Image (cartoon, rainbow, N blue to C red):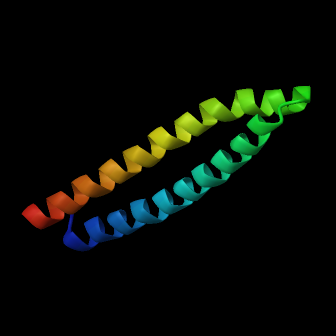
């Protein structure tokens, strides 16, 4: 098992990375909603088409980071 300090640093890293991914998700959500309200140009439709899979990929990545951090916290508490 890794040392306690290494686990704490890894938890801090995951929290920091999660924060950035979550902010990107919020910005992407706002942009997609704005484009979906007026999808008149082909460029807007292309951004929507590319943005939706990116949104889901970022959501999955954010959730995986959250799960990793929770597992490390649980491991730190248990032993």
Q: Is residue 76 visible?
A: yes
> In the displayed structure, would residue 70 be above or below residue 64?
below
Horizontal and vertical percent position of residue 2: 21, 61
- Image-quadrant location for residue 52: top right
Q: What x and y, as percent, mark residue 44?
A: 84, 33
Frontmost residue, 44 versus 68: 44
Q: Residue at x 78, y 33 (%)?
A: 47
Q: Left or right? Give the position of 9 relative to 27.
A: left
Rendered residue at 46%/39% (across/down): 60
Asked whether 79 or 50 is in front, the reply is 50
Report the side of 17 relative to 27 (left or right): left
State the residue at coordinates (59%, 38%).
55
- Toward the left, the furthest residue is 79
User: How many numbered marks are there?
Assistant: 0
Quarter of the image with the N terminus in it: bottom left
Quadrant placement of the C terminus: bottom left
Residue 26 location (% of width, % of height): 60, 53
The image quadrant that residue 58 belongs to is top right
From the viewer's perspective, is 37 left or right of 63? right
- Taking the spot 58% from the left edge, 58% from the top edge, the residue there is 23
Camera sees residue 1? no
């Amino acid at each position: 098992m890794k040392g306690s300090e290494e686990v704490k640093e890894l938890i801090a890293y995951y929290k920091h990375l999660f924060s950035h991914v979550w902010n990107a998700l919020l910005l992407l959500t706002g942009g997609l909603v704005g484009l979906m309200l007026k999808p008149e140009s082909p460029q807007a439709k292309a951004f929507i088409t590319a943005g939706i899979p990116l949104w889901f990929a970022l959501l999955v990545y954010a959730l995986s980071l959250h799960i990793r951090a929770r597992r490390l916290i649980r491991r730190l508490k248990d032993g």
